[in-house]
Amino acid sequence: MADGSASRQRLLFALLLAPALLWLVGLIVLPHLELGVLSLRARVAPRVYEASLAQFRTFFEEPLYWRTFVRTAVMSVLATACTLVLAFPIAWTIAKIARGHARSAMFVMCLIPFWVSETVRTLGWMILLRESGVVPALLVSTGLAQTPPELLYHDATILVGLVYTSLLFMVVPLIGALDTLDDALIEAAYDLGGSGLDILRRIIIPHAAPGITAGCIVVFMLTLGNYLTPTLLGGKDSLWFTEQIYTQFITRFNWEQGAAFGFLLLALSTAIVWAGLRIAGQRFGEVMRRT
Amino acid sequence: MIPSLPRTTAWRTAPWLYAAAFFAFLFLPLAVVAVFAFNDAPYPAPPWRGFTLMWFGKLARDAALLHSLWTSTLVAAWVTLLSVAVGTANAFLLERTQFRGKALLSLTMLAPLVIPGVILGISILAFASRIAQFADDVFGWELDVLRPGLPLVVLGQFSYIVAIATLTISARLKRFDATLEEAAYNLGASRGAVLWTITLPYLRPALIGAAVISFLMSFENFNTTLMLVGADAPLTVLMYGRMREGASPVLNAVSLFLMLASALLAIGLMRRGGSRPA
């Protein structure tokens, strides 16, 4: 009897473990190994390959590629910073100032736009900003511009789109972090003569650091990996690195080069996540559970 | 600053002014998409030329768009089914069993959330193609399932959506009062009966929440899908293609339809008092 129940326990455990392993090994670990192998080989003859760093050499020798890479990284950092600055006041208002119905209504209002697909939201920005769009028409009719300016296809436009797409992922962890800050601490700091800036710098930001880190990591990652917003809102010259991966993989069918680009993007994304966690002294698991 | 501190009038009103501006920014793009679905002009652009429902009629006759809507629904249904099923198994694995390497496994389960979607897409594409090549070389099988197409799209989306389902479901299972199950066992219930009458009903809100989130995330997914898509394009990929070519208010009409559908889903979920989305 005891043996029977022990073997049934083992069977049950195996049944629970199997889907997890199939998922993680079959869809995550092995595909990434495959990507690694692809990125490190070169075709010497039809169906004959040898180990090579050619793809990575191409990346560093071709200015278009590494410039796009650096550009994508810099724009993502900028977008993350802007998102933090825009999201903080609203998170503060929701967590500390609004009460009761206003509070829950504002929280839900933050969520609603993100239930709608990014494609739809980007379509909205295109209708607003294109030369024949709503904002240029308003600028002309109010006399601020003589002819309708083209507001699409600028870097600033991409930034607006990226920040817009990212706001929710910053607001939610910030609210979570600010919610747990005891008002008494702020009152005490005020009574002790701390100025607004002192309180922000020495009480609020240290307390909210986990939320800020979590938000920044998620936003940076999503921005770096974004495809829709930069390609639709940006012009011909505003290349995004995910676009390069797509071009190599799908358009040119150069999987080796595409895999190398994919690995570089993954490395950058992982490095920033890791650095962010190190700076804030946090563990990956905790941060992901927060968001 | 907080309300309990003395504040000047400016400091008292500033947060509300900012909130108003913030929400205007948030809803502006959605509002223009909705408004221009009703404009009687060939392009979704000002000026306003009068109200029409013509674009909804055009949408009803746009076979490609309707087909892509159906494709998206089909893909999302599969992804939801797989994600909730595997997510539930994962939750039980993480919360109810002890084994060596569990910490590593639970950390690995979060990894898909920090891998850019494009990379999930290309890595699965490359790996599937290697297996297909292998099957062809060794056994002479033609495995079309592993070529770009809907089965791969489902797998690609599943690969990270299941991580979210796992988090949602195990968060609720963690709070479960195990004495309820013990009581049922003491009363002579079988393992199956306890699971079916005690544990799963308790998990229901989380299961529904995970299902809704999985469905929406699948329906909206673009990055992973773009890399794995074959001849049958889901809605987001088709819309992207058309947005690059130019604009037609038919896209506004279908977008409005999507907004209403996701609003209904969201309201339904919140009414149930299930787990908070996101």
Image (spheres, coloured by chain):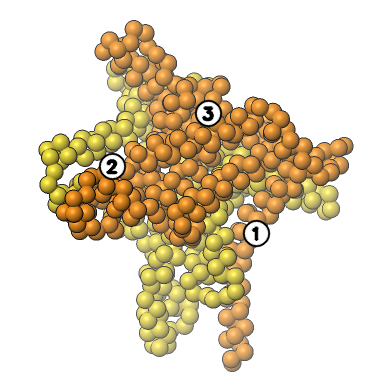
Q: Residue at x 56, y 21 (%)?
A: A236
Say whether residue B278 is left or right of residue A75. left
Which tint was used for chain A? orange
Q: Earlier in the sequence, mark 3 or mark 2?
A: 2
In this figure, which residue is indicated by the disc labeled 2? Answer: A89
In the image, what residue type sits under mark 1?
A: Val
What label does residue A231 carry, if any?
A: 3
In the displayed structure, B251 sits above or below A111; it is above
Q: Dot 2: what SS?
A: helix
> Which numbered disc, 3 or 2, marks the residue closer to the eye?
2
Query: How dense is the environment of label 3, judged by Cα within 10 Å: few (below 14), some, or many (20 and up)?
Result: some
Taking B131 as reference, is A26 left or right?
left
- Of helix, strand and loop, which one carries label 3? helix
Q: Nearer the viewer, residue B110 or A58?
A: A58
> Which residue lies at the image location 41% right of the left edge and 38% below the top edge?
A81
Label 2: chain? A
| Marks 3 and 1 share the same chain | yes
The chain letter under disc 1 is: A
- Say whether residue A241 is left or right of residue B29: right
In the rendered image, which quarter is residue A56 located in?
top right
Residue B90 at x, y percent in the picture: 52, 65
Task: Quickly name the residue at label 1.
Answer: A25
Quarter of the rendering occupied by the N terminus of chain A: bottom right
Mark 3 to mark 2 CA distance (whole Å): 30 Å
Residue B271 appears in which quarter of the rendering?
A: bottom left
Colour chosen for chain B:
yellow
User: Residue type at mark 3?
Assistant: Thr
